[in-house]
Structures are given as structure tokens and as C-alpha cells.
Image (tube, helix red, strand yellow):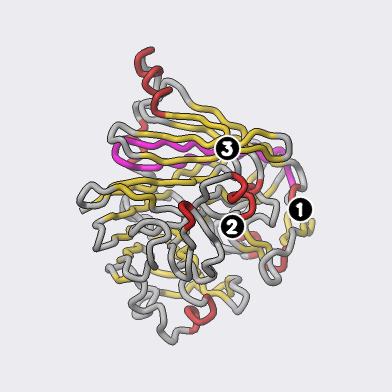
Amino acid sequence: MKRILLLSMTLAAFTLFSCNQTSKNKEMVKKDVFGNHNGKEVYLLTLTNKAGNVIRLTNFGAKINWVEVPDKTGKKENVTFGYDTFEETLKGDMSFGSVVGRYANRIAKGKFTLDNVVYNTPINNGPNTLHGGPLGWHSVVWNTEVLKDTKFPSVKFTYISPDMEEGFPGTVHAAITYSWTDNNEIVMEYVCTTDKKTVVNVTNHAYFNLHGAGNGDILDHVLTLKASAITAVDSVMIPTGEIRTVAGTPFDFNTPHAIGERIGDKNDQLILGGGYDHNYILDNKEEVDASVYEPVSGRMLEVITDQPGLQLYTGNFLTGKQIGHGGKPFNYRSGVCLESGHYPDSPNHHDFPTTVLNPGDTLKTTTIYRFSAR
């Protein structure tokens, strides 16, 4: 699996620095009380890099709540979905910016088998389990640590997922560390261990609109995605087992295409998904696995990951009822998700890359969102 070269460059210096650096780090991370949930304090953490650009995180769902980056003229705008208050966050779409687990994406019929034992998980998406169930990791309060002695502002969230939470076996210790570099990169490092054989698939479910969140749709965003195939799906979005090449189809983004250019084509997979809602099998040959460019603002988002798959989702189920920052509605196809991870329903497809995590093993994976403008 591809090693992330950027990580070695940007995080090699994540060792001890002087007391002056520690003092600077305190200034670069501001921690405010955001709310209270089930007796636990919820925080909003503001990370500011040396360029003065800001992201905001919350330990409720270990979410990315805000990403404010400049366009080609220097004008700054938030480009991700989120909410202004915790009350809105709690009532709103739980997936916005969340760390999703214990199993991101879908599990067919809420069932999988490990060592001849059948496990049942909650049905919350048609006949399937989606994103770990309704009370998955996106809906819990994570422990929070503002890291000191680091080169860039960094926050570590940890959560202990108990045995049989949402039907999944094993007590899993999960950690996600967010770092906000001076090159406008959100570096996300995931680490998971278990005391019992289980399945784990983690991702971040941020929605992006490079015009600015809530400002129109993403159909003009130009996507490049280095993948030769997708996992074809059935009518309930579960992989059929077919690995379908993208060449000559609307799914081929190996060369740049606007997202909206072919989204309405009469392709069976597009019809089933109501647009793009598919796992791409990444080639993992180049540093950058995917990029999205918005030509008006000049903003670009690049995705770099060591994971084997990337779920492209184009906001096909957004309705405008989700009201986010500044009272802006999130309308149909107004956001795009690029979710790194393993393939959907992998526990039921033994020919897919395994998502099994055994006691004594450690799951470590890194994904980077890099923002720029041109």
C-alpha cells in the first residue's frame, strides 16, 4: 500500500521543541466549551496556522466543523459543512465532518460472520447498516487532548468503543489526531486496537464546497481521481462483487472532468446511486489520489491517503432542510465527499482487502486534505 510521502516531510518535526514552541502551540489552539452531552463536556477547538488560516474541530463525533481557506484573490471562506451551535449540531446531520466507525460505509443486511459467529448490527439505511449504525462513533463525545511540543497545531481525540457496541465485537481503543499545517493541510492519523477479533473501517465524512459552504452546488467542481475501477453496487448500494473498470464510462476521472458533466448520463450505476455514491479502487501510485478544483474561486482540495478505496459522494440526498453555518441551507448536490477507507461490505466479501483487526495488531492509517488556490 502506498506510503504517504507528504507525511514524512510535514510531520518529521513532530518531536520535542523548546518552551517557546510550546507557548506558540497554546496560541494556535483555542479550546472553548461548545455544549454538554450525556454528562460530558463538548468542546469547540480552533486551530490557526502561521498563515492565519483556521479550522475548527469538536470532540462530539471528532468532527471537522469549519475550514476557512483563501481563494486566488486571498478572500477567505469556510468550505465545509457544519453548524454554529452544539444544539444545531445535535439536531442536524450527524455525518457532517465526523469520524465514522466502527465500520464506515455499508454492511449488507446488518450481518457479518467472524470465526463462524454471526454478528448483527443496526439497520439504518434501507436493509443495511450504514456508518456503524445510528449510535456509531459520529454520535459520541471523544476525549480531547491539545498536543504540546508539536510543530503545527494538533488535537488528539480518543474513544473506547465497548464490546458489542452497535453489535460489533471487541473493545476498541480508537484515536484520531488532527494536525493543521502551515501549508493548509489537515493531516488525519487514525490508530485503533482491539481486545477481540473485530472489523474496523474508519473515515472522515466531511462535505466540501469550494465556492464556500452553502454557496451553490458542486457540479462545476473539476475532479481528478486516480482509480481504474469501482466496486459496482446493487439496488441497495451493496457491492455485487464485480470490479468494474471505469474506462469509457462517466466514472472515469483519471483525466479532469467537471462533476456535473456526466452525472445525468443513463448509466446503470449512476441511476442506482442517484448520482455518484461509489467506492473507487485507488491506484495508489501517485502522491495525490484525488483533487477537486473550483475554477471561479481557484480553490483546490487534494486528497492523499494510504487507504485502498475512496468513496465519492455528490450530495444526492441533501434536501435543503439541513441549515448550517450562518443559516445557509445545504441543498441538493451542494457538497462533495471524498471518504478514504476500505470497500463497502468488506466483511462479507473475502476477496476484498480485509478489515479484520485482531488482538495484538494495530490499525494505523493516514489521510491528508490539502487546500490551495491558483
Query: How far apart in space, not on screen, are marks 1 and 3 (Cα)?
Result: 30 Å
Verify CB contact (< 8 Å) between mark 1 and mark 3.
no
Which of the 4 image quadrants contains residue 256? bottom left
Going by the image, does 287 lie left or right of 25? left
Which residue corresponds to the image point at 68% horizontal and 34% vertical from the top-left? 40
Q: Residue furthest top?
A: 19
Going by the image, does 15 lie left or right of 45? left
- Tell me the crowding category of disc 3: few under 14, some 14 to 19, or many 20 or more residues within 10 angstroms, Cα based: some
- Looking at the picture, how far across and down is residue 370, in whole percent? 34, 47
Circle 2 SS class: loop
Q: Which mark is residue 34?
A: 3
Residue nearest the observer in this picture, 278 or 284: 278
Q: Magenta stretch mostly in which secondary structure?
A: strand
Tell me: residue 104, above or below residue 320.
above
Tell me: residue 40, above or below residue 202.
above
Residue ID for mark 2: 93
Sequence-wise, the earlier of marks 1 and 3 is 3
Q: Which mark is residue 167?
A: 1
Query: How far apart in space, not on screen, are marks 3 and 2 (Cα)?
Result: 17 Å
Which residue corresponds to the image point at 20% horizontal and 53% vertical from the top-left? 374
Identify the magenta region: 169-195
Going by the image, does 139 lie left or right of 312? right
Q: Which mark is residue 100?
A: none
**Disc number lying in front (1 or 2):** 2
Q: Amino acid at mark 1?
A: Gly
Figure disc tally: 3
Sequence-wise, the earlier of marks 3 and 2 is 3
